[in-house]
């Protein structure tokens, strides 16, 4: 095994360990850098790992959410990974139509230790959960233990409010080898129900500066907390304020 490969696996295992043994009052908080500069700021602030938001990266590259070409997304992730020493997980949306083996190879080339993978199409239609689980299983087979797979569940953001539908998808994805599931947009009130029905780590999104705190979300069942493009949008708002003052 090459030194580079050994180092990559070691960093992935470090990321995996961060998800283990979390207590309700101490969820794993993973802020989302959108470029190399923001990644360095977050690392310097003491966060043990980072998770890129596809929407935030898209905005930094001048694209609408979901419109970033695959090559540009992978290049942006690689720049973020090179800028820091902590593990970085990458949001790669629905996988850009790539076959599992190619997707895994592209991710590993960036140096990322994990990925978010969505279960709805770009047009907002949910994927068939069993077919998606089979695809996730192929991703897991191709990746082995080299990537931490966070399977996003889009039921709530696609208008399916029944928590049982999310729990059903979670069970299929965990059985397929997902390391974590991410019921994005789940109402805070249903988090305890989701926690009781989902095996393994559960990712919950938080809002920057409003709503329940990461600790409160942890107490409701979240294993790890991410912020989507919240930090990038907050930073953009701050730049707008400064621009008005300069003008």
Image: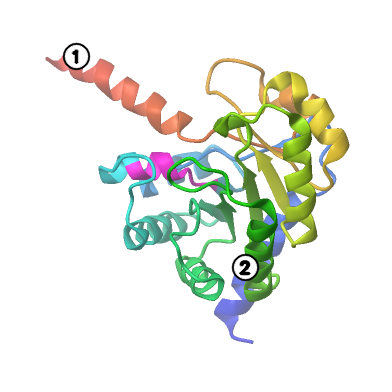
Q: Quick check: 4 above or below 80?
A: below
> Which quadrant would the N terminus be assigned to in this image?
bottom right
Given residues 135 and 216, the one toward you in this image is 135
Question: How far across and how far down the image is residue 91, in percent?
Answer: 51, 50
Q: CA distance from mark 1 to mark 2?
A: 47 Å
Q: Which mark is residue 143?
A: none
- Quickly name the residue at label 1: 244
Q: Which residues are magenta?
A: 51-58
* Residue 12 quadrant: bottom right
* Element marked by disc 1: helix
Badge 2 density bin: few <14, some 14–19, many ≥20, Cα 10 Å: many
Q: Position of residue 137 (x, y in %)?
A: 69, 66
Q: What sort of colour scheme is used for the picture?
A: rainbow
For residue 139, which numbered disc appears in the image?
Answer: 2
Q: Specify whether residue 38 is in view.
A: no
Query: Taking 58 as reference, is 194 left or right?
Result: right
Observer able to see residue 76: yes
Q: The C terminus lies in which quarter of the figure?
A: top left
Q: Position of residue 3 (x, y in %)?
A: 59, 81
* Left or right, residue 104 beside residue 97: right
With respect to residue 177, does 202 lie above or below? above
Give the residue drawn at x 82%, y 48%. 200
Residue 95 screen position, x and y as percent: 49, 59
Q: Secondary structure at mark 2?
A: helix
């Amino acid at each position: 095994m090459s030194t580079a490969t050994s180092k990559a696996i070691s960093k992935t295992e470090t990321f995996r360990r961060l998800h283990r043994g979390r207590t309700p009052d101490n969820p794993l908080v993973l802020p989302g850098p959108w470029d190399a500069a923001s990644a360095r700021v977050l690392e310097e602030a003491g966060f043990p790992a980072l998770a890129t938001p596809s929407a935030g990266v898209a905005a930094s590259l001048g694209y609408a959410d979901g419109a970033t070409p695959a090559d540009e997304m992978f290049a942006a992730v690689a720049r973020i990974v090179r800028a820091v020493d902590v593990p970085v997980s990458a949001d790669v949306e629905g996988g850009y139509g790539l076959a599992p083996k190619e997707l895994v190879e592209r991710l590993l080339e960036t140096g990322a230790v994990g990925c978010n993978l969505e279960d709805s199409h770009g047009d907002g239609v949910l994927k068939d959960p069993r077919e998606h689980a089979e695809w996730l299983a192929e991703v897991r087979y191709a990746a082995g233990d080299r990537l931490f797979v966070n399977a996003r569940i889009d039921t709530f953001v696609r208008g399916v409010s029944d928590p049982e539908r999310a729990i059903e998808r979670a069970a299929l994805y965990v059985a397929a080898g997902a390391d974590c599931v991410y019921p994005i947009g789940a109402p805070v009130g249903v988090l305890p129900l989701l926690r009781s029905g989902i095996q393994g780590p559960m990712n919950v999104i938080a809002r920057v500066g409003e709503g329940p705190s990461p600790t409160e979300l942890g107490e409701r069942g979240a294993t790890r907390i991410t912020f989507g493009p919240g930090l990038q949008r907050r930073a953009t708002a701050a730049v707008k304020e400064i621009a008005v003052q300069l003008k």
